[in-house]
Image (cartoon, rainbow, N blue to C red):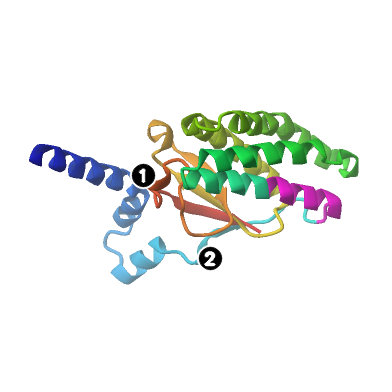
Amino acid sequence: MRITFFGIAAMAAILFSACNNGDNKNEHENHGVNNDTAQHDINKDDKEVKAVAVIYANADAKVAASIKEIVDHYLQIKNGLANDNSKEAAYGGDAMTETMKKMDKSLLTAEQKKVYDEIEDNLKEHAEHIDDNSGNIKHQRQHFAMMSEDVYDLVKAFGAGQPIYHDHCPMYNENKGAMWLSEMKEIKNPYFGSEMPECGSVEEVIK
């Protein structure tokens, strides 16, 4: 029993260390710098997070509303996965698919349509996989990682009706890492859920 306990404790320490690798890197880079300055660099406030401007900020109002709805369903999926709730994630996937079917692409300019069309098919595919795999959260998370890349491009192009944070988890997919988007600065990891809810860092904010 004692051996098992210490084994679990050691594993937890290793995971915590890996998850916080980014912070350790900052500490090493700030070696020899005033401690107050180094700590300030690590604990960035909203103003210091890299801000990304939306490309088509003046898109048609109905287009903007549809994009916001798509992103809202993405956030529903994200929050479901962060809470280890596969069924909630599936609901979000189904709702996203239905919203995309109703998207009026005739309201897009030629340039905007090109951007949207490059995202649309992949995004639908990932939403359908997440919807069809309620109860298989590992598979949902695999498609969510790919979906996040598409939604990131979508939000950078059209916005989301609110500030959206671009977060990064260094440990997902055998330490290859993965990104996700969030409506809040607080980290709630959708790839590990309750196992490691705070694993990750804020990369930028899209306004």
Q: Residue furthest left?
A: 2
SS majority, magenta = helix
- Do callouts 2 and 1 mark residues in contact (Cβ within 8 Å)? no
Q: Element type at marker 2?
A: helix
- Between the residue at mark 2 and the residue at mark 1, the CA separation in whole angstroms equals 27 Å
Quarter of the picture containing the C terminus is bottom right
Picture residue at 82% right of the left edge, 39% below the top: 102
Q: Position of residue 33 (x, y in %)?
A: 30, 65
Q: Nearer the viewer, residue 28 or 88?
A: 88
As for residue 65 lying within the magenta part, the answer is yes
Picture residue at 9% right of the left edge, 41% below the top: 2
Q: Is 86 displayed left or right of 206 in the figure?
A: left
Q: Nearer the viewer, residue 41 or 63?
A: 63
136 in relation to 42, above or below: above
Give the residue pinned by disc 2: 46
Q: Position of residue 39 (x, y in %)?
A: 35, 66
Q: Position of residue 6 (x, y in %)?
A: 13, 42
Give the residue pinned by disc 1: 195
Q: Element type at marker 1?
A: helix
What span is colored magenta in the figure?
58-71
As for residue 116 lying within the magenta part, the answer is no
Q: Position of residue 172 (x, y in %)?
A: 42, 37
Q: Is 127 displayed left or right of 186 in the figure?
A: right
Q: Residue furthest bottom?
A: 36
Kindly identify the amino acid type of the residue bearing the numbered disc 1. Answer: Glu
Q: Nearer the viewer, residue 69 or 27?
A: 69
